[in-house]
Each structure stands twice: as structure tokens, then as C-alpha cells.
Amino acid sequence: MHKESHMMSYGYTPEWSEGSVKPPIFQTSTFVFKTAEEGKRFFEVAYGKSELNAKEEIGLIYSRINNPNMQILEERLAILEGSESAAAFESGMSAISTTMLSYLKPGDVLIYGNPVYGGTHHFITHFLKDIGVKILPFSSTTKNDEILKQLKTKEFSGTVKMIYFESPANPTNTLFDLEELHKLKSTLNSKLNNDVMLIMDNTYLGPIWQSPLKFGVDAVCYSATKFLNGHSDVIAGCVMGSKSVISQIKTLRTFLGSMIAPYTAWLLTRSLETLHLRMSKQGENAEKVVDFLIKHKSIKAVSFPGIESMGTQQNEIFKRQCKGAGAMISFDVYGGEKEAFRVLNKLKLIKLAVSLGSNESLAQHPHSMTHADVPDDIKEKLGINKGLIRLSVGIENVNDIINDLNQALKEI
Ligand SMILES: *Cc1c(COP(=O)(O)O)cnc(C)c1O
């Protein structure tokens, strides 16, 4: 069966709940064991003292460790990503921070791609740096040799434990080359006799338009708040990868307590039922909006995966590793902040708000909003200009979205 067909019922049996066609919300903190022996066995497995044998299933213990809503959701997330396993979290940031802390300790080296989501940037450059993790940024144009050369300096003595990045990067839609980054990982592993984790944030294109695990990425992180939930009413996150990687991350999740709550998991499970429909429509709408923006005389540049102006290097990567261009468009208006604000203030249908991937269209100004914390010189280098507007395209009638943009662009 296809992935979208599994989203309606996989991992749930109506007999568990009076024949209820959909899983109810298991709003409980704890679960009753049939016998003391059973409780003992469940804990042995949950705390990693013993492995499950082939016929055994892990029993329900306590909702910080496991809960039916979390498990059903995780099984469906793994199907969508084509991974062995998945872990669900109460936010994208808790998915990302728990993943990083599962592998990094003081003295280790983290190599990270710029730009990354603002919250991730803060976690890396403040928290991880403060606890003694050595952080080395790179960009989509940095050659592997340059990174290897920098790692030879004293500042980065220590074991490289992780390469972390986003593709396309927010808000510029810049793609990173998965083959090159996998080569970097392999080189580091052979040189250092090491096990470097290659971790990617797949929020922008996954799981429909991009499958990084097929390119040797070890785990993908998501803000499930975005496309996966798609209704702007939930904050959630997840990580997908092999059983062993996810099991290590889940162990730390249990002790940090960053797991998804039953109600959040239930809402997200409901959203996954329409994921293919929503994302397909958003993608179709975005293509038409891009066609309109490219031709508009008030617009200096449009950033969208696969369009000619992105250049041959970017489009070569796009063809190799993406199945679609997504629904996130960035465009520069002529002028700067004043002109961009005039357009944003005039939008009627499109809401002026951060966040993305939802069924309603949203627009914001990265320079002064989501990326306010990034130093100005880095913003300039990365192309986060004062005239840049980031647009997340929803499922409204595309003519209404285009008409809204058209009337707002008349302001400049
Ligand atoms: C929103 C976002 C995050 C953070 O997720 P939350 O659900 O807000 O915690 C991480 N990465 C990307 C690319 C995002 O867009």
C-alpha cells in the first residue's frame, strides 16, 4: 500500500477501544500491569537492561516512557519518512535539542550549516558553546577541504561527533549537497576512526518532497508544528532514523521529559491523514505564485528551489535530491525594510505571522523577525536582505492568493 493509505488506520486496532474507528485520546499518566512479573519485564526492556525477544511487545508503563497515542503517531511518522523508527516530541526544538544532547558532550566538535532556524542557531551558539561544545559553522558553498583544514587547528581539537544542517535552509531556500556532506562524514570517520552523526532538519521539504535518509543521513529532525501538522494549532516535533539511533534519542527523551503529550499526538495523527492532500495542493499553488512573482515589476529576485535564477549548482543539487520544490517562497522587493513592510501591512488574505507549512498562507520579514538575532554581516552574506519577504503558501484558491499579493505590491 501507499504511504497515504496507511495514515488512516496503521498501528491501531478498533477492538482496543470499543470498536472506535479512530484511536481515542489515552489521557492517562500511568498503565495498570496485569502482574508484578509483567511490570518487572516491561521495566527491564524500557531501561535497556534486556532486549525484546521476537514475540514480545513492549508493554505500556507510564506516559513519559510510552503511550498509545505517541506510539501510533510514531509508527505513522516512520512510514512517511521510510525509516525504521521515529520519536515524537512536544516541540521541534525539543526534538532538535534532545537529538544533539544525545550525541554531544563538552569537548566534542559540532559542525553546523548556516543558516539554520533561529532557535537552533541560539541553542548551538549559546547553550552548546557555553557547556564547552566546539562549534564550527559552514555554508552551502564551503568546500569539504576547507572544513577539514579548519579542523586541524587547535581551536577544534577534539572529536567531531556531529554534522548538523537544514536543506533548503530557512529563509533563503539554499540547498546543501547531501552527497558532499556524506563524503565529509566518511572522510572524518576514516581519519578519526570515529562515528560522526550526519543530522538534517527536514522541516521544509519532508517527508513528501525529500528523503535524506536515502542519501546516508543518520537522522532527520522536524518541527512537526509546520507541514506535518499544517493547521497552525499545535507545537510538536519528531526525529526519524534507524532503530538504534532513535532508541538512543528516546532514552534521553525519557529523562529530559520532552516527549509528546497524548492530546498533541492525537491532533498530529489526525493531521497526518490529510498530509499528502495538503502538501500537494500547497506545492501546486506555490508554483503558480512563483510564476506570478517572477514576472512582477516590483520584485527584484525570487528564491524557490529549481527556478532558473537559483543557478546551475543549486539546480543540479535540486534535481539529484528533491522530488518537489515545496511551498516556501522568498522574494526581494525593490527597496528595503520600508517597502517590504508596506507590502506586508497591506496583505488581507495572507496573514502576517511567522511559522510556515500551514493550510493558510503566511508571510513575514526574516531580517527583522525570525532572523533578528543573526548578526547583520552574516545576514548580508547569506542574502537575508532588508527587502526580503518569506511567504508560506497555503491551500486557499490560488487566484485569491495571487490577487492579494498583486494588490499589496501596488503599494510600492
Ligand atoms: C519552526 C522550526 C523549528 C522549531 O520548531 P518548533 O516546533 O517551533 O519548536 C526548527 N526548524 C525549522 C526549520 C523550523 O521551521
Image (cartoon, rainbow, N blue to C red):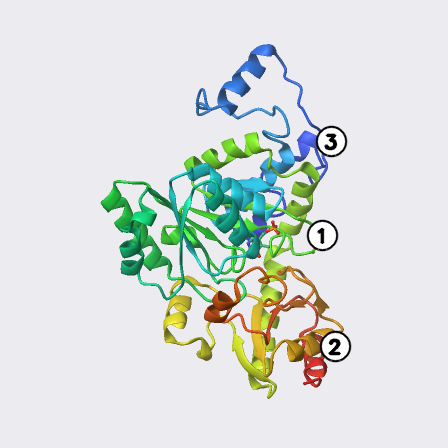
**Residue shown at the point (52%, 16%) measured from the top left:** 41
Q: CA distance from mark 2 to mark 3?
A: 52 Å
**The label number, if any, that marks residue 233 in the structure image:** 1
Q: Give left or right: position of 145 versus 73.
A: left
Looking at the rendering, in which quadrant would you find the C terminus? bottom right
Q: Amino acid at mark 3?
A: Glu
Residue ranking furthest to the left = 191
**The label number, if any, that marks residue 346 in the structure image:** 2
**Residue shown at the point (28%, 45%) measured from the top left:** 189
Which of the two labelled residues, at mark 1 and mark 3, occupies the earlier sequence position? 3
> How many discs appear?
3
Q: Give left or right: position of 269 versus 244.
A: right
Relative depth, front residue between 202 and 58: 202
**The label number, if any, that marks residue 18 in the structure image:** 3
The spot of residue 31 in percent (x, y) is 66, 23
Q: Is residue 345 above or below residue 209?
A: below
The spot of residue 52 in percent (x, y) is 46, 24
The spot of residue 294 in percent (x, y) is 55, 82
Relative depth, front residue between 256 and 349: 256
Dot 3: what SS? loop
Q: Residues within 10 Å of mark 2 (few under 14, many from 20)?
A: some
Q: Which numbered mark, 2 or 1, is in the foreground of this view?
A: 2
